[in-house]
Amino acid sequence: MDEPIGVFDSGLGGLTVVHAIRERIPGERLIYLGDTARVPYGTRSAETVVKYALACARQLVARDVKMLVVACNTVSAVALEALREELGIPVLGVIEPGARAGARASRSGRVGVLATSGTVSSGAYERALRAVDPSLQVVTQAAPLFVPLAEEGWVEGEVPERVAERYLAPLVPHEIDSLVLGCTHYPLLAPVIRDVARRLFPSEVTVVDSAAATALELDRLLDERGLRSSRGERGLEVLVTDQPGAFSIVASRFLGESLGDFPVESIDL
Ligand code: DGL
């Protein structure tokens, strides 16, 4: 199975998932599609997100991907079923792996989730966490300002700290001890979130990154479905629907390496 794995997101944030996959599974070729012309998805209706997600997926299927990783939490929250119904290939979302890792990290059974408004209102993380353990207490918090902060690279200092305080404060009375970062962009703010959590919560809170959990799950799935590439070729091709001003700086930040080393193609959906 030497075809590439397709990965897509509403924009460039999903490159945090590509980074995690490249770290964990170096021997696979990846095609990443970022719908940069229509980001953000997190504030849109579920119907619109499903429509956009199907367009992204069809584009990747036309490029012969052997399976699809939905790097976007908002798409994973509302469109996974529609994607699985239409596409004849395995589809992996980020919510179930993130929820399993979040549940594993909790000793108290009280788990917090930070996500976009769309993901929070879908209830997808509550469902996924309760599927792991019905006795879990789950509290979700929308953290929309983290998305533009990550895009701007404003990931340390006073401003992100103040924003993190506002988002984490409502979780303090719930005495969570595990906090899932349920959005592609939030791993960039993980150091600030960890610092602020250390200050606000009386006991330790483990911050869980769903990108790393998804890469782990993908690794397992490749063997389970007999999809692992025999060539061990490493590669990344990037497709975007728009290339805004600071495109390659922002993309490199999410990817954790220079985007300059990879082919980037602008496409229309
Ligand atoms: N990719 C989205 C997510 O993970 C965040 C950005 C957006 O709102 O589109 O939910």
Image (cartoon, rainbow, N blue to C red):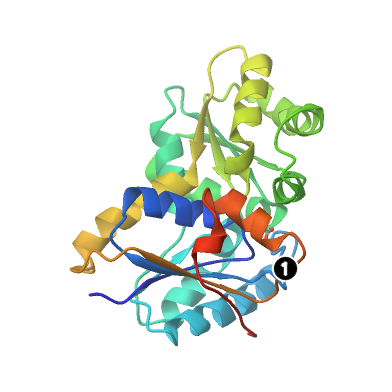
* Residue 268, x across and y down, in percent: 65, 85
Disc 1 is placed on an element classified as loop
For residue 253, above or below residue 52: above
Residue marked by disc 1: 45
The quadrant of the rendering that contains the C terminus is bottom right
* Residue 250, x across and y down, in percent: 67, 54
* Nearer to the camera, 28 or 88: 28
Q: Is residue 134 visible?
A: no
* Nearer to the camera, 78 or 154: 154
For residue 59, above or below residue 243: below
For residue 186, above or below residue 252: above
Where is residue 220, by image quadrant? bottom left
Where is residue 64, by image quadrant? bottom left
The residue located at (33%, 63%) in the rendering is 234
* Residue 249, x across and y down, in percent: 67, 54
Horizontal side, residue 238 vs residue 219: left or right:
right
